[in-house]
Amino acid sequence: MITTSSWPGRAALMVAHCAGMVDLVALPLWVGTLIGQYGFDPQQAGGLATLFLAAAVLASVTLAPRFGRLPRRAVVAVGFAVAGLAFFGASLRQDFAALALLHALAGLAAGAALSVTHGTIARSANPHRLFAVVGIALGVFAIAFFAVVPPLLAAVGGVALFRVFAAVMAVAAFVALFAFPQADAAPAGDSTAPAPAAAAPMPRAVWFGIVGIACMGLVQAMTFAFLERVGSDRGFGPAAVAGVLVALSLVNLLPAALAALLEKRWSARAVLLSGPVLQALLVALIMQSTVFAPYAAAASVFAAVMIFTHTFGFGLLARLDASGRALAATPAMLMTGAAIGPILGGTLVKAFGYGSLAVAAAAIAALAVACFSRLPAPAGAPARSVLA
């Protein structure tokens, strides 16, 4: 029996997390390719990314309450297989309507698979640590992605992006079919039985955590979608901007590992209260800097803030809701904000310029902090502040 405590099970969760969270890695190139090589304006390009993310939210919201009753391996394997086919179809089309339909289909399928993946992680013996492990895998995936995809785009064109997405989804489907684990809390031999706490209502505080993480996901996507474009439009040059994306992928190896090491030393609640503030400050640097060095420094660590903060949030919410249902909705938490982000960002940039994203980020960060302030510190949590 493959469980989340076994290496085959952990490897399958790593691959599924990387495939399902491909937007967290690829969004700048995704939107940039749709603008630069497909000829869409920022609002249209952001809208296509939003369709993928909104469909993933819909799938996650639909499946999360039913997490305990789902045939998990089948959902993950079929979900990624369908997403791969949809992305391959997207590589064959250039028109907006067809791409919109295929983005939505890919989002529904990948969102379903990712929802089950995160619910399974939440039901492991140590959700914080296992989520950190899959986060490290995402950092490694990001390095490989940025090493391979930009040269392919230069050589082949925008079609290469969707074929890479299709290949990633196909690998995830294959691995899930043979190695996706049972949740550790499920009764032996029964991968579909609900957790003992499944019937209990979720604590009210969990909903504040969900909204706070969605707010951070909104700022992440709104900014990340235009990170490559703002560098290009400021005249920093393709090579310099590509170097920033590579640096970002290298830095992304660190936050999940640090979150695992600091699990017992830093208060999860204090990390959650600090994360949105730091995120908004980095947005201001990225979007308002006319000099390369501040832009590059802020952009390189921007995604790391979200990864580090969310790892602590994942662990805290797993302790507050033992059923796994809240964290089966992790794609909805991240992608509700992320779904709005690209089209909101595109609309703001089109109407008011890049500086407007910094103002929006500050307002959303204030809402996130207000939500996280309603989360309790779980019993036995470290009292030490992140500033200690």
Image (cartoon, rainbow, N blue to C red):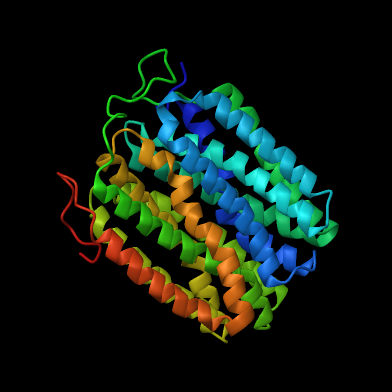
Residue appearing at x 77%, y 49% in the figure: 90
Classify residue 31 by image quadrant: bottom right
**Percent x, y of residue 334:** 47, 53
Is 174 situated above or below 266? above
Is 83 situated above or below 143? above
**Percent x, y of residue 176:** 58, 28
Please name whichever residue, 58 or 168, is drawn nearer the observer in this view of the structure.
58
Residue 291 in view (yes/no): yes
Left or right: residue 10 compared with residue 103 = left
Classify residue 48 by image quadrant: bottom right
Residue appearing at x 31%, y 45% in the figure: 317
Q: Say which quadrant the C terminus sits in.
A: bottom left
Residue appearing at x 83%, y 52% in the figure: 93
**Percent x, y of residue 5:** 40, 27
Left or right: residue 141 compared with residue 317 = right
**Percent x, y of residue 57:** 52, 48
Residue appearing at x 43%, y 23% in the figure: 3
Residue 152 in view (yes/no): no
Please name whichever residue, 110 or 143, is drawn nearer the observer in this view of the structure.
110
Is 256 situated above or below 319? below
Please name whichever residue, 1 or 321, is drawn nearer the observer in this view of the structure.
321
Please name whichever residue, 201 or 144, is drawn nearer the observer in this view of the structure.
201
